[in-house]
Image (tube, helix red, strand yellow):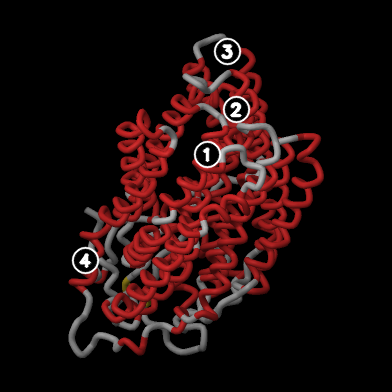
């Protein structure tokens, strides 16, 4: 539902991102605590390698059924239902039971075939018995993550970002509770039990808001019949998104497949480094999580100029976040890993190995972020596209080739470098394809924006490296002072190099808009940065949709949900 005077619910994009950021940061913090507890209790050993092989299941299912595939599929579907004034009940009544049934069959198959799964994922693993047991426990996430992802996408399409942002907070609470209660009795298997229990909490934390959406949905003759559910839910629409998501996650498969033949603990070192490196990427992708419903609506309206502006602004802000974090991680990787993990069974040798991997991983963070952003732009279109999956397949081939060729001589560093090279190549190719396949994206301006931010990150990294060598203080103090130094230098250099890159995004309004003085405002179409880019516009004429027909005020009659509480 719209707010008073036709205003959409909620506040600015920046405020929605802040609310989501706080909850996701809390969940990420508990995820770090989870990894710290595991490092302290179990170190980096054959038993942790066994758990991490089973962890591959929720790691794969999470992007497939929560963050990437499910969101890319469901947010545009629900957005279009709301745009037509239809309710959610037909969609929930037809799609959700079928999905649960299909995912339950997959869960059962994984449990039965657990020994084969372990052999395929990590053929050289030293402790296969515990890995099989953990696989059977974590297989339940296939169903629970599917339901949680369905709820998350539906709530985000209604601009209710709070409950979806809290799912990993609930998830890690469950894991930590079970580790605390069972680690003394069953060892690392307690973490797998916690994964299963935590996944049910992901559903529980969203259930009240999801039920409110169903309650508020039209139930009378205006509601859409079950046969009118968007055709995007057909197999032809789902397949490109599923293949894209699995191909992206296959980078982890390649690492663990090759890493299983290296020294015991190698997979664990890669995992700990990756968990640290993922934090800035996840936070930067908050941007596209919050703005994806707007992108989907602009795409549905045929407003390619708006889509292009949204992509450029999101990429500038996300690039600034992730490149500043890259500068910090490269400069302070040994201190970060030491502070976080060097306790209990995690030794100084483990710290050195993990920190070296982290520095290499960090070089691929921009590529990880850019792939996630560009893929959403492709999948916001009504017609399914295979381009993101094809581009990622090319990047995966590079990852496998480099990792396979150099792992024997360079070990885990080769695997980290292969990951960074493959995903960066995929990002460049995917961004280049946006102009031809999605919208008139100004590629030269984007390249200039990113180049300026890369130079700012290089200067900040140099300053951080000098600070890391000059500071003689406790590690936590070094991290705090070094982080301030890196952030300050990056901010100054970024402002000098490209003023105004971030401000238009922060000022943008949520999707919905209102009529004002004879014209239509829709979300961020009235931003100052947009008004100054008129020479680049090749989209529909003002006041029309993509087919030359008069355009409705975006969201003027769309039930976009209540304000966040």
Q: Please tell me in which quadrant of the rendered image residue 442 appears.
A: bottom right
Question: Secondary structure under badge 1?
Answer: helix
Question: Split into 4 quadrants, where in the image is the N terminus?
Answer: bottom left
Q: Which residue is mark 2?
A: 333
In this rendering, the label closer to the viewer, 2 or 3: 2
Callout 2: few (<14), some (14-19), or many (20+) C-alpha neighbours within 10 Å? Answer: many
- How far apart marks 1 and 4 lie (CA) works out to 33 Å
Q: Which residue is mark 4?
A: 211
Question: Secondary structure under badge 2?
Answer: helix
Task: Indicate left or right for 421 with 379 as reference.
Answer: right
The circle on residue 169 is: none
Disc 1 or 4, which lies upstream in sequence? 4
Q: What's the residue at 54%, 29% (across, down)? A: 488
- How far apart marks 1 and 2 lie (CA) works out to 13 Å
Q: Does the CB distance between marks 3 and 1 fall below 8 Å?
A: no
Disc 3 or 1, which lies upstream in sequence? 1
Callout 4: few (<14), some (14-19), or many (20+) C-alpha neighbours within 10 Å? Answer: few
Question: Secondary structure under badge 4?
Answer: helix
Question: Secondary structure under badge 3?
Answer: loop
Q: Which residue is mark 3?
A: 471
Q: Nearer the viewer, residue 225 or 514?
A: 225
Expressed as whole percent of the image width and height from the top left, the position of residue 261 reads 70, 40
Q: Which residue is mark 1?
A: 275
């Amino acid at each position: 539902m719209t707010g008073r005077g036709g205003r959409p619910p909620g506040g600015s994009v920046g405020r929605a991102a802040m609310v989501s950021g706080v909850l996701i940061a809390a969940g990420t913090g508990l995820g770090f605590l989870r990894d710290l507890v595991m490092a302290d209790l179990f170190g980096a050993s054959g038993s942790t390698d066994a758990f991490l092989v089973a962890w591959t299941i929720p790691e794969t299912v999470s992007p497939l059924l929560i963050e990437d595939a499910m969101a890319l599929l469901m947010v545009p579907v629900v957005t279009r239902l709301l745009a037509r004034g239809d309710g959610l009940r037909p969609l929930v009544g037809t799609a959700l039971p079928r999905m649960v049934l299909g995912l339950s069959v997959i869960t059962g198959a994984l449990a039965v075939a657990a020994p084969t799964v372990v052999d395929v994922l990590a053929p050289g693993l030293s402790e296969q018995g515990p890995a099989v047991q953990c696989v059977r426990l974590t297989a339940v996430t296939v169903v629970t993550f599917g339901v949680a992802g369905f709820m998350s996408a539906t709530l985000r399409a209604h601009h209710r970002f709070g409950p979806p942002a809290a799912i990993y907070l609930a998830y890690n609470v469950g894991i930590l509770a079970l580790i605390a209660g069972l680690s003394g009795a069953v060892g690392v298997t307690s973490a797998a039990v916690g994964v299963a229990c935590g996944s049910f909490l992901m559903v529980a934390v969203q259930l009240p808001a999801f039920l409110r959406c169903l309650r508020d949905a039209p139930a009378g003759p205006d509601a859409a019949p079950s046969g009118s559910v968007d055709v995007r839910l057909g197999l032809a629409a789902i397949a490109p998104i599923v293949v894209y998501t699995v191909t992206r996650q296959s980078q982890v498969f390649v690492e663990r497949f090759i890493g299983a033949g290296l020294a015991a603990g190698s997979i664990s070192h890669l995992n700990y480094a990756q968990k640290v490196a993922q934090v800035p990427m996840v936070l930067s992708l908050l941007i596209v999580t919050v703005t994806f419903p707007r992108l989907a609506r602009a795409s549905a309206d045929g407003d390619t100029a708006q889509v292009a502006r949204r992509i450029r602004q999101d990429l500038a802000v996300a690039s600034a976040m992730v490149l500043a974090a890259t500068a910090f991680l490269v400069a302070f990787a040994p201190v970060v890993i030491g502070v976080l993990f060097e306790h209990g069974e995690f030794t100084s040798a483990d710290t050195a190995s993990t920190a070296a991997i982290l520095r290499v991983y960090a070089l691929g963070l921009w590529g990880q972020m850019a792939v996630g952003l560009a893929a959403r732009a492709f999948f916001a279109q009504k017609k399914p596209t295979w381009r993101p999956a094809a581009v990622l397949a090319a990047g995966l081939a590079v990852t496998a080739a480099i990792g396979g060729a150099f792992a024997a001589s360079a070990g885990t560093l080769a695997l980290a470098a292969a990951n960074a090279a493959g995903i960066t190549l995929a990002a460049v190719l995917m961004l280049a394809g946006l102009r031809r396949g999605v919208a008139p994206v100004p590629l030269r301006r984007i390249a200039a924006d990113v180049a300026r931010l890369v130079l700012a990150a290089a200067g900040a990294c140099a300053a951080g490296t000098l600070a890391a060598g000059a500071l003689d203080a406790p590690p936590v103090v070094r991290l705090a002072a070094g982080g301030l130094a890196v952030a300050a230098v990056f901010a100054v250099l970024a402002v000098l190099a490209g003023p105004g890159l971030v401000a238009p995004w922060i000022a943008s309004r949520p999707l919905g808009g209102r009529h004002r003085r004879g014209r239509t405002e829709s979300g961020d179409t009235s931003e100052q940065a947009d008004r100054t880019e008129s020479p680049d516009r090749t989209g529909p004429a003002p006041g029309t949709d993509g087919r030359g027909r008069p355009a409705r005020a975006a969201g003027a009659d769309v039930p976009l949900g209540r304000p966040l509480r």
